[in-house]
Image (tube, rainbow, N blue to C red):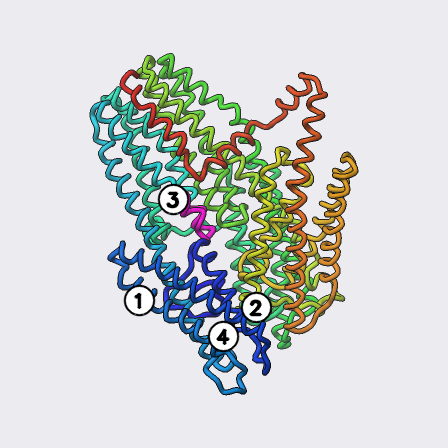
Amino acid sequence: MASSPCGNTNFDSGLEIKTRSVEQTLIPLVSQITTLINHKDKPNKSERTLAAIHRVGQAVSVAVGRFVAVGEAIASENQELKDEMGQACFEARRAGDAIAQLTDAGSTMPPQSEGGVTVFNDRTGMVKAARLLLSSVTKVLVLADRIVIKQIITSRNKVLVTLDHLERVSTFQEFVQIFSQFGNEMVEFAHLTGDRQNDLKDEKKKARMAAARAVLEKCTMMLLTASKTCLRHPDCESARINKDTVFHRMRCALEQVIEIVTEARSCGENRILPASIYNGIKDFKSNVECLRENLYTLSPQSMGSQLEALVERTEDFTDSAYTSHEQRQAILGLCQLARQDTQQLVHAWVEAQSVHAKEATECMEVAILKTCQRVHDLRRELHKVAVCRATDLLKVHGEHLPLRALKAGGAEGNQEAVAEYSRTLTEQKEQLVETCRLLCHVSGTEPLEITCIHAEETFHVIGPQIISAAQTLALHPSSKIAKENLEVFCEAWESQLCDMALLLREINDVFEEKRSYLSLPRAGKHSTNLKTAKAVKLDAEEQSSMAKLGLELRLLSSDVDTEVEKWEEQEHDIVRQSQSLASMAYNMYLFTRGEGLLKTTLDLFHQAEVLSEEGLQLCSSVRTFSTRLVDEEKSVVMTEMEKLVAFCQQLQMGGKTPVQGKTATFQKVDSSIQATRGILTVVLYLLPFCNKLNKKYKSERSSLGSPQDWRERQDSTSPVKEEGALHSKNSNGFGVKCLEQHIAGLNILESK
């Protein structure tokens, strides 16, 4: 079955939409067809209505004709898809013609006149034509997407062949020639995979693709210097080990990219992500809260076993030599309290079952709340331990003392110093690897878990590579190439530390957002509300109806994120609050797709309440900001702020309005998302306007300030954040410009 935006349309088996580009192409077509199908069967039609329907039908037919022409051209150029593509194009053209005929103005007349078959008296025919059209168009798009996959595979194969040649070269001249070709092929591969990464809908696949491409980015430069070092010192064992590791990592990363785009099931793909404590707590709380609805789905014994499995995972924290005694005791204490609360819940649960209760008793409700709060406290403590550990390590390793010592020892030919600081670096590597593992436990999302695993693997591999590069330099202290090689590996280590700082910030952002969400009152938190609110999920039909509105929300939140990135002051209240609003709106978009953190309508209404409060906080920040503006500027800002206040109040009032029944609940969901869309629309206008004014007044202040003031402001900027931001901006191209520059400068290789 195809996924949204096509609603409940029955597609051919196996046609799953996996890319945003295919989804975006289908949305206008779905919108037009929905207009035709949902037209009410009124006995009388005005000429204006008939003309409008005719225009929509003809527009669909013409668009399908152009679309099919492109599909047929693709089929003629790709023989392996010719038959499938030809059949899909034929079906699409036939369905387009049927829709054009059903909406033809010449035959469209009121049903009672017993004229020709039309959209008004043959709704079934229109539905069949629409289904055939959507199915065939989707099939054409999915088949065309195979061409993109084929291009990536072909590009990868060329890179692999050249990589094999590079590994076997024995002279600088041959290396220069082949590496130039390899560089051009890697640039092409970078562009193709970057586009594919951005197009993927699955966030886990996107994160895995980003990790693989990050390896390729770093390894491309490592391969250049490691190969040069091996050519200059062919008998050096440490240089050979260094080079072999780089080639192995590149092949693994290339293979991972192909696994993702082809959805192959290799050994690497079959490896399940390590069970994180966050997911364990989430599943445990979900099972506990489900007891409110059904007392007999699970057994009391299974609940205790699930908690013990969760407690066992905390041993990664408590068994660590780097966890302080106080932290260890706090974690163990919370685990014991969670056991006690769970035992009380099980006792109340068994009592309720013994009297054949149909729903949770009040005693059970109290136990449920206590148990959920306790495991949340446990997660908060684990988060604090992991984040504090990572923050402290980044501060210590930010000085890069072992790297400096290894460079100095290698340049002096001091093998004893290199051995000593290699042990220091190995200890730091083990600390970082373990810390990445702890961060993975509390990361909060699967993409961040994948990024943590990538960071762990990177530190694990690059540490020994730095040591082998330092050993090579110590054996050949006068070698410029060996020195350059060590420098490149040290830069890769420093770059990964910057990436870890960004990762830490993202994990904190996720935690802070969820913490504010979890602080909201939930159903059953007060005895007076035990039975007043019922959490329900949207069914497939409702999700389909919400698809267009949800998509608008996603696009708006993406636009807000884009505008936020343009601000120089990322810690500005307006920026921070706008980011928070965009993030919560994105959660609401995921809800319309049946995904994400918000599982029920009650979750959505709680999120809307938090969003409205954050929106009012933004109003306060904007009001403060406007105090330094001139009258004309202030008037514009205040006008938009009034709109923002109105939308926030509308969202709050809607949230407080009790509803009963499926229709009323759905209308409340629709109203909440409409108001959220209005909030983001105003924020999207305010952000660039306020940013422009902020730069203007900042510039005026700077021109009046002293040179010393300016220098102090410059010095206060965090270097880690700047480097991380630069890395983030360049990640999608995996160093293409840098690589192109190195290819252009390869003629200096032999002189080195």
Quarter of the rendering occupied by the N terminus = bottom left
Q: Which secondary structure, mark 2?
A: helix
Q: Which of marks 4 and 1 is nearer the N terminus?
A: 1
Whether tag 3 and tag 4 are in contact, CB under 8 A, the answer is no
Query: Closer to the N terminus: mark 2 or mark 1?
Result: 1
Q: Where is residue 66 in the image (x, y as percent from the top left)?
A: 39, 60
The answer to whether residue 332 of the structure is visible from this angle is no
242 with respect to 454 (left or right): left
The residue at 22%/33% (across/down) is: 165
Q: What amino acid type should be assigned to the residue bearing mark 2?
A: Glu
Residue located at (31% from left, 62% from top): 85
Say whether residue 206 is left or right of residue 553: left
Q: Please tell me the numbered disc located at residue 105.
A: 4
Q: What residue type is labelled 3?
A: Thr
How far apart marks 3 and 4 lie (CA) works out to: 47 Å
Q: Mark 1 points at which residue?
A: 87
In this figure, which residue is indicated by the disc labeled 3? Answer: 193
The crowd level at tag 2 (other Cα within 10 Å; few <14, some 14-19, many 20+) is some
Tell me the amino acid under the disc marked 1. Answer: Gln
Disc 2 designates what residue?
Answer: 542
